[in-house]
Image (cartoon, helix red, strand yellow):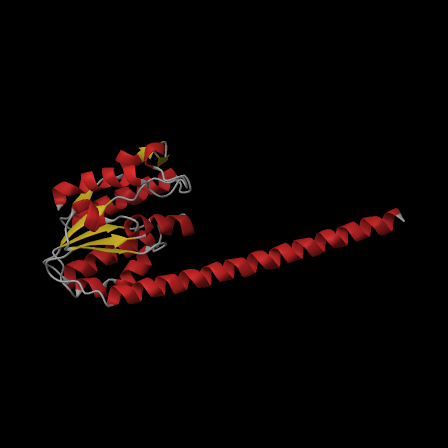
Amino acid sequence: MKLFIAISVLLNIAYIYKLSKDYYITYKKRIASEHVTYLYNRQTIYKVLPINKNDIVFIGDSHTQKFDVAEFFNKTNIKNRGIDGDVTEGVLLRLSDITKGHPAKIFLQIGINDIFQRNDLIKAIPNYKRIVRRILEDSPETKIYVESILPSKFANPDTVIRYNRAIKQISRDNGLTYIDLYDKFNSSGSLKPIYDCGDLIHLNGNGYVLWSGILKPYL
């Protein structure tokens, strides 16, 4: 009898585990599908909003997308081209929609999601070099401003620091302006609480006030 009960318990545990695993796999697939749809939607919107030679363009991920740059800087020629969840490869794929307009300036802030996804720099740094090279080749009159990525509780601080050093060197090699955001927002490898919106990743209003203040001299 005890053996029968033990077997029944084990079978129930195995069944519950399988259900949980199947649900998790289905959930991940649904989230991934929704994210792909979201990325595609943002890309189609940006395609029909043209860039011209007087524009200042902000390229990046969710940090940039949530940055109300036109209002913070009170300039109608500032265009936000941030996409939540974007990575360096994603920027490469949509870059031509921006460079064909030959904007006056580009502010580039991308890479934290590469670290979230892979926790290495094998692809991110070569991609960043390609991004810079593409802009220089396709729109040589555009001034490029390389912004460091921000600290995050969910990213290895050493990896973030190495990435920022690498893109700083890329900016030096190409005669570009590098803007250090990391040190202003950093507290032991995470966002300073005063700038954290509550998820340990994204900025609150105070954070964007600081960011916009750092960038104003370059506009």
Residue 74 image point, x, y percent:
16, 48
Work out whether residue 172 can be spotted. Answer: no
Q: Position of residue 190 (x, y in %)?
A: 37, 36
- Residue at position x 24%, y 37% in the image: 210
Q: Which residue is nearer to you in this view: 46 or 150?
A: 46
Picture layout, residue 206 above or below residue 15: above
| 167, above or below 91, in the image | above
**Percent from the top left, x then y, of residue 10?**
76, 51
Q: Is residue 44 left or right of residue 3?
A: left
| Image side of residue 105 versus residue 118, left or right | left
Question: Image height check: is 205 above or below 87?
Answer: above
Q: Which residue is drawn at 50% across and 61% down?
A: 29
User: Residue 129: percent from the left, percent from the top?
Assistant: 24, 55
How many numbered markers are drawn? Answer: 0
What residue is shown at x 27% (from left), y 48% (from top)? 67
Judge left or right: residue 110 versus residue 9: left
Q: Give the image quarter of residue 155.
A: top left
Examine the rendering and report whether any part of residue 126 can be seen: yes
